[in-house]
Each structure stands twice: as structure tokens, then as C-alpha cells.
Image (cartoon, rainbow, N blue to C red):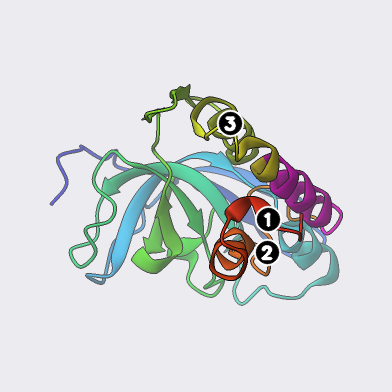
Amino acid sequence: MSNIDLPSSQTVLLLHGPKKPYEVTTGYAIPEVKSEHEVLVRAETFGLNPIDWKAPDFNFGIPVLPYIAGRELVGRVVKPSKHDSRVREGDQVLVISTDYRDLRKAGFQEYVVSSDFNTTEHDLDVIVTENGLADVRGLSPRERARVIIKKCAHPVYQPILERYLDKAEFECLKKGWGHEPHLLFNSFDMHKALLEEGSMQKVKSF
């Protein structure tokens, strides 16, 4: 049950046909949560996925007209899932919409329904460790990683972590994956070095 009062309607970005511009439309109904596995999010920032402009230009991935597009957004939870307690009312979350046929889950609107498994909580402000304090308010994930390494990681491991992040950014950015760069095939190499060589400092992959 949400404690947040919702408006009677919302503004959306509607597509009325292939090769036509999106139109800002007011007075649109707010989508309703229909499952205990769904979350209602008030959108704050939208991403622009290539499908959002390729779909109208090339007339594919549009199951119904008028259509609401949008695959990625950041927002605040206004109605949490009854099933998943990971996210709570007021949390800032990243939402990835994978069901383009369900317009309730489309990103280009003020209020978006999301499946709880596609909703990740990113509401982190300050990290406190024995090595230092990292204020990461207002920073992107890549910026946060740099600050956390500099302020919180043990000095012995800072160069190793910086090399990993440099490599991850380089490899991911050239493929267009720059939001949260990861190299999963390298992410456990420090632990592998600890088991095989006796020290994480002996990692050789980055």
C-alpha cells in the first residue's frame, strides 16, 4: 500500500505511426499494478535505447498504435512490490523494460510499472569504511567506482582496482556498454590469485 498520493493523470510521449514524431500527450491514465511482482515507479531520468528511434523509423517492434516507447529509466518507487522487499517506497531505482508489448512498462511516461526482477535499487549516498569515507551523492556508477577506490580501498589494492576499472571502461565503452562497465570474466581473478598464488596482489589479468 502506497502512502504517496498519485495525480489523476500523467504526461506521456506517444507515437501515432511509423516515421512520425513522438508527441507529448497530457491527460493520459496512470498505469496500474496488476501483480504482486510489480512495482510502480515515478520516472525522473530516461535513457535513449537505439530501439526507441529505430522502431518508428523502420516500423518494427511496434505492437500497437498509439505506442509508448522507452526501455530504460531511473525513478522513485511510489508503490513497492508485495512480493520483493529489496526495494521500498521512496527508493531510487534503475528500471529496464523488457516487455515492449505491455505499455504499462514503457519508459516514456511519468509513471511506469516494472517487474520487481527488472528493478534495481541504486539509492546510495555515503560509504564508510575503516580506510575512509566516500561521498557518492549525485555521481554516476563509473564516477562512484573511482571515488570508492580512492577513498575506501586499501592502498595496496588501489592500483589493481584502478587497472581493472580502466580495462573494463575501455572494453565496455568501445561496445557501447558504458553505464556500468564490468568484465565478468575478470571480476574474480583477484580471488583466483589468492587461492592459487597466495596473494591477490599477484593477479596478472589486469
Please name the residue shown 44% across and 27% down the image. 131
Circle 2: residue type? Asn
Magenta highlight range? 162-175
For the question of whether residue 154 can be seen, the reply is yes
Q: Which of 186 and 131 is in front in this view?
A: 131
Position of residue 130 in the picture relative to residue 135 (left or right):
left
Q: Residues within 10 Å of mark 1 (few under 14, many from 20)?
A: some
Which badge, 2 or 3, comes first in the chain's sequence? Answer: 3
Residue underneath mark 2: 186
Please name the residue shown 77% across and 63% down the image. 56
Nearer the observer: mark 2 or 3; the answer is 3
User: Where's residue 111, x and y in %?
Assistant: 41, 48
Residue underneath mark 1: 202
Secondary structure state at the residue bearing disc 3: loop
Please name the residue shown 70% across and 56% down the image. 49
User: Where's residue 136, x and y in %?
Assistant: 49, 27
For the question of whether residue 11 can be seen, the reply is no
Position of residue 88 in the picture relative to residue 164 (left or right):
left
Distance from disc 2 to disc 3, alpha carbons, whole Å, reads 21 Å
Distance from disc 2 to disc 1, alpha carbons, whole Å, reads 14 Å
Q: How crowded is mark 2: few (under 14 residues within 10 Å), some or many (20 or more)?
A: some
User: Where's residue 169, x and y in %?
Assistant: 76, 47
Which badge, 2 or 1, comes first in the chain's sequence? Answer: 2
Position of residue 100 in the picture relative to residue 129 (left or right):
right
Identify the image quadrant of residue 120.
bottom left
Q: How crowded is mark 3: few (under 14 residues within 10 Å), some or many (20 or more)?
A: few
**Overall secondary structure of the magenta section:** helix
